[in-house]
Image (cartoon, helix red, strand yellow):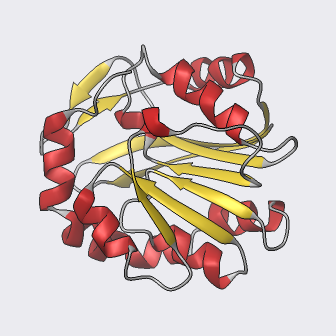
Amino acid sequence: MSEPDRTTLEIYNRKASDYADRNEIHLRQDPRLEEFIAACSPGGQVLDLGCGPGTSSAVMASAGLRPLAMDASAEMIALADQLSGVQTQLASFDELTGIDIYDGVWANFSLLHASRADFPRHLRAIRQALRSGGPFYIALKLGKGEARDALGRLYTYYEDNELKDLLRSAGFTATNSTTGDSAGLDGSMARWISVACHG
């Protein structure tokens, strides 16, 4: 087990409200989230892993799913606690355990803060917790190596083929992927990839 990067966590605790305000509209209108919800069993139990302020979980709940919003940031969880129909858990990636619990797992720009050494272990834990055939959506930033952004948050970057190989090794089948670029909380533009999989 390894602890979340302390500096990254402190930044998210300090900027939780800014992050929520900046991403509210985008997260509520994300076509990838609509696809994820449609791929889940109606009324299913789903995990929003690294949920941030819980906006995606709120959309899932309004669609009839039963989301568990999990994040290592206490301030992010405090925001998610205010949302209707959303159960929360203050926990790191390492605290994800269990077998065949979730009908879907949504990891939207969260696992990019895990170290490269820990990433395969986290993917295996997600696969174990995901019911057979359930959807798994993951989004990361494209690139190589690890680096801190202008705010000090630590990122691990992956190339397209590298990510898909890691997903395959963990037992996932990728069905489609999307790439793009957008400005982050630090204001800089970054390339990203989102991959839809099933277990």
Nearer to the camera, 33 or 45: 45
Q: Looking at the image, is 17 positioned above or below residue 119?
A: below
Q: Give residue 137's position: percent from left, percent from top.
A: 65, 47
Residue at 80% from the left image edge and 67% from the top image edge = 38
Q: Examine the rendering and report whether any part of residue 152 can be seen.
A: yes
Q: Quadrant of the C terminus?
A: top right
Q: Looking at the image, is 124 positioned above or below residue 68?
A: above
Nearer to the camera, 107 or 189: 107
Q: Give residue 35's position: percent from left, percent from top.
A: 74, 63
Q: Looking at the image, is 126 positioned above or below residue 72?
A: above
143 left or right of 39? left
74 left or right of 71? left
Extreme-front residue of the structure = 98
Residue at 63% from the left image edge and 73% from the top image edge = 60
Residue at 87% from the left image edge and 44% from the top image edge = 133
Nearer to the camera, 48 or 68: 68
Q: Examine the rendering and report whether any part of residue 141 can be seen.
A: no
Q: Give residue 46's position: percent from left, percent from top.
A: 67, 59
37 left or right of 14? right
Residue at 73% from the left image edge and 80% from the top image edge = 64
Q: Give residue 69's position: percent from left, percent from top.
A: 49, 62
Q: Quadrant of the N terminus?
A: top left
